[in-house]
Image: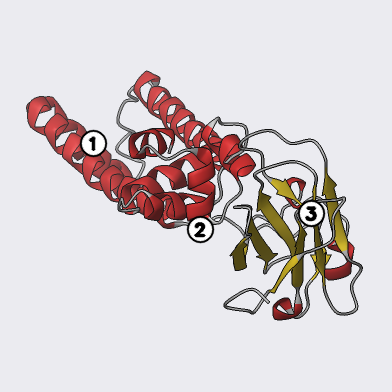
Amino acid sequence: MRNLKDGSGLTLTELAQATAISKSSWERYLNGKQFPPRHAVQALCKAVHETEDELLTQWALADVAWSGRGHTTSAVSGSASSSSSDAGTSALDSPVRESPPATQPVSRTRRVLLAASAVIDQRPTTTAVAVFLLCGAMVVPAAVSYASRTTTSQPAARPPICQLRSCEGRNPRTTACEDPVTLASHTAADGTRLEIRLSPGCRAGWIRVSPTHPGFRIEITGPDARAQSVDETAWSADDEVTTTMIAAPHPTDLRACYYPSLGSPGRECFDGGAASPK
């Protein structure tokens, strides 16, 4: 994923705007601080105009290793191989017993084993090739089946850490609400970029801002929900500012307002379902 991003020439800010995933989340994914979700891989491929099949295959294998499911499978396989090896060694080390006396009946299984032993003594090379081919015919389909299940399996969806009112006042960057979409966006007169963001899984929204100067205020409101706001007096280039989350049972009713200056009147507002600012 890091190679795709670097090869595209996109900055983290540009990648965040193109994928609707925050810049801080991309920083964690690309630097290996957090395992990326499947939708982030798909969004990256779409942003850099690359097909997603190969990268999703690599992601699925990495997910198995990350979650520990691959270790369990390896342990089981290793145990089975060890048991088979021990059984084979035991069979080779066992001494060949003499034929029973004529007075004792010879079982059918023993007669088959004696006949097989005679064939092996007469044609050892042919027998070895036949055993090798038989083992290959048994192992290859099993390996193909396992690889197919590994590459096509979907990771279990994580439950949201909060929903509706229980999300209010929480930082969207530190929750498991990692399925955000942009409901509406607006560029203010001073060039500040604002977006109303929504997590469908958590059913909560917030404002994300790419500011051009310090000393501004943002506020998000909704029916029957407590307003969430930020007064930003310290700011540095390329920083993103977000409000805390607000319950969004009806996302189109969310309303965002931008106050360019804390000391002067005037604001710019727009709604979650509006095509243009009001």
> Helix or strand or loop: what does disc 1 sit on?
helix
Toward which corner of the image does residue 134 lie, by quadrant?
top left
Relative to 190, does residue 166 appear above or below in the rendering?
Answer: below
Give the residue pinned by disc 2.
154
At horizontal 60% and vertical 58% (from top left) the residue drawn is 156
Q: Earlier in the sequence, mark 3 or mark 2?
A: 2
Relative depth, front residue between 153 and 26: 26
Q: Whole-percent x and y of residue 162?
A: 81, 61
Separation of marks 3 and 2 at Cα, in angstroms? 33 Å
> Helix or strand or loop: what does disc 2 sit on?
loop
132 sits left or right of 232 in the view? left
Kindly tell me whether residue 132 is visible in this rendering.
yes
Pointer 2 local density, CA inside 10 Å: few below 14, some 14–19, many at least 20: few
The quarter of the image holding the N terminus is top left
Give the residue pinned by disc 3.
243
Pointer 3 local density, CA inside 10 Å: few below 14, some 14–19, many at least 20: many
Give the residue pinned by disc 1.
114
Relative depth, front residue between 85 and 258: 258
Given the image, on which type of amino acid does mark 1 rest? Leu
The quarter of the image holding the C terminus is bottom right
Q: Whole-percent x and y of residue 45?
A: 38, 51
Q: Whole-percent x and y of residue 118?
A: 15, 32
Given the image, on which type of amino acid does mark 2 rest? Gln
Q: Earlier in the sequence, mark 3 or mark 1?
A: 1
Relative to 207, does residue 184 appear above or below in the rendering?
Answer: below
